[in-house]
Image (tube, grey):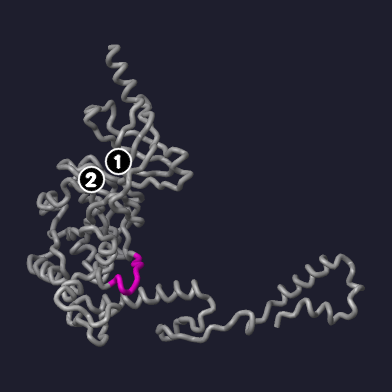
């Protein structure tokens, strides 16, 4: 019994290693990792706070972080995060650290698969730099011909989809090897079956699921925060809130690398100019004869608009600014110089006069004429 007490004391004073599997408010649920020194632990998870020194240096703690935990309270199952190890990868939306790949889940029916929406999700996933595993759920609701058609289309896009049916228990076992021993971020729009898939892969998760909205034709949000779940075969799944239209923020030159069709063409031939945007410029090596070219052009225009807006806000004295005309097209118009062309409001001028009166403190009679007073309020 004495030996057991000594071992417990040594374990309490040691620094433990773990992975943050959930974050809510200022509390972090840490899954502890057995080490050679301590192959067995009294508990497997501790609810931790962050040390004040980490907060002072601005060290954020994210789901997926590998951390060091000090002074564990085994009876209360509490602890304190003392350090955060360097991250191999980091996602801001959703906030996940050390992820290896993205499992992008879409439904092939109910709701119907929208190629434009799928493209935006794929581009968003490509921007992370992580490996992408595309999974299409509800295959039992379509014919074999429809499934084959989508498979051929997606292969031309540069992706090899995994077809499954959580409801009919098809294809899920074939998906498991792609998730083993990895931290996988599950993403996709609402109502496609992400939570149902996780419940099938990890029955202990027991995530809440909702039906697809009949009026809107899309799913309702069921996941409110990011959380990691243990896979029975090894690995972790990060369930994330679903979004129907992901925001794409990148420079116009970065966008081309998010389309495998463009990458494949540039691997064979290079464009004449390094800053080519692949929309018919002289010497461009990328053809326009591929299915998602229209989507590429649309997203490219959005990125250019964002870049121009950021440039305008950073340089307010720029000679021209972009404005959306009545027909929805962008047009440039001269930017007025504020001090030269724009009149100061009467309210501002009146307030300036009042301030001047207070400053003179009753010595207005020392001014030779009211023209001297007007000189102080000359703004035009």
Label located before the other in sequence (2 or 1): 1
Q: Image check: 339 left or right of 328?
A: right
Per the image, label 2 sits on a secondary structure element best described as strand
Q: Is residue 323 magenta?
A: no
Q: Tell me how far mark 2 sits from mark 1, CA to CA.
A: 10 Å
Q: Residue at image x 10%, y 70%?
A: 152
Where's the C terminus, which quadrant?
bottom right
Q: Does residue 286 sit above or below 13 in this rendering?
A: below
Where's the N terminus, which quadrant?
top left
Residue 236 tag number: 2
Q: Position of residue 347 (x, y in %)?
A: 72, 73
Pair 2/1: label in front = 1
Q: Residue furthest top?
A: 2
Q: Image check: 280 left or right of 75?
A: left
Q: Residue at image x 15%, y 65%?
A: 159
Q: Position of residue 48 (x, y in %)?
A: 38, 36
What range is drawn magenta here?
Answer: 247-255
Relative to the observer, which residue lies in front, 91 or 43? 91
Q: Residue furthest right?
A: 365
Relative to the observer, which residue lies in front, 94 or 15? 15
Q: Is residue 264 visible?
A: yes
Examine the image and state in which quarter residue 194 appears: bottom left
Q: Residue at image x 20%, y 59%?
A: 132
Q: Does residue 47 sit above or below 123 in this rendering?
A: above
- Asked if the residue at tag 1 contacts the one at tag 2, i.e. Cβ–Cβ closer than 8 Å, the answer is yes
Q: Image check: 334 left or right of 27?
A: right
Examine the image and state in which quarter residue 123 appears: bottom left
Q: Which residue position holds label 1? A: 19
Per the image, label 1 sits on a secondary structure element best described as strand
Q: Residue at image x 26%, y 51%?
A: 99
Q: Position of residue 158 (x, y in %)?
A: 15, 68
Q: Position of residue 285 (x, y in %)?
A: 19, 81
């Amino acid at each position: 019994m004495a030996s057991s007490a000594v071992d417990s004391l040594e374990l309490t004073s040691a620094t433990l290693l773990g992975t943050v599997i959930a974050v809510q408010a200022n509390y972090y649920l840490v899954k502890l990792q057995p080490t050679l020194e301590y192959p067995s632990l009294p508990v497997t998870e501790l609810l931790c706070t962050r040390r004040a020194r980490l907060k002072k240096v601005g060290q954020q703690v994210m789901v997926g972080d590998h951390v060091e935990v000090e002074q564990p309270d085994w009876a209360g199952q509490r602890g304190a995060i003392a350090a955060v190890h360097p991250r191999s990868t980091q996602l801001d939306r959703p906030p996940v650290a050390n992820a290896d790949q993205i499992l992008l889940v879409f439904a092939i029916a109910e709701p119907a698969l929208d190629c434009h929406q799928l493209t935006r999700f794929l581009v968003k996933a490509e921007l992370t730099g992580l490996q992408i595993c595309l999974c299409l759920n509800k295959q039992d609701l379509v014919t074999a011909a429809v499934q084959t058609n989508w498979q051929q289309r997606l292969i031309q896009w540069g992706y090899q989809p995994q077809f499954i049916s959580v409801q009919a228990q098809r294809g899920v076992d074939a998906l498991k090897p792609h998730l083993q021993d990895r931290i996988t971020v599950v993403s996709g729009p609402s109502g496609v079956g992400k939570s149902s898939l996780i419940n099938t892969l990890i029955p202990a998760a027991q995530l809440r699921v909702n039906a697809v909205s009949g009026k809107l034709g899309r799913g309702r949000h069921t996941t409110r925060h990011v959380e990691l779940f243990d896979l029975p075969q090894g690995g972790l799944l990060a369930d994330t809130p679903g979004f129907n239209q992901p925001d794409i923020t990148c420079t116009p030159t970065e966008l081309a690398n998010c389309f495998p069709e463009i990458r494949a063409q540039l691997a064979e031939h290079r464009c004449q100019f390094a800053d080519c945007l692949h929309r018919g410029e002289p010497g461009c090596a990328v053809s326009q004869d591929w299915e998602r070219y229209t989507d590429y052009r649309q997203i490219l225009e959005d990125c250019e608009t964002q870049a121009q807006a950021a440039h305008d806000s950073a340089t307010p004295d720029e000679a021209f600014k972009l404005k959306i005309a009545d027909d929805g097209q962008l047009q440039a118009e001269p930017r007025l110089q504020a001090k030269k062309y724009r009149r100061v409001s009467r309210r501002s001028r009146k307030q300036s006069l009042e301030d001047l009166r207070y400053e003179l403190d009753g010595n207005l009679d020392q001014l030779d004429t009211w023209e001297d007073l007007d000189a102080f309020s000359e703004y035009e």
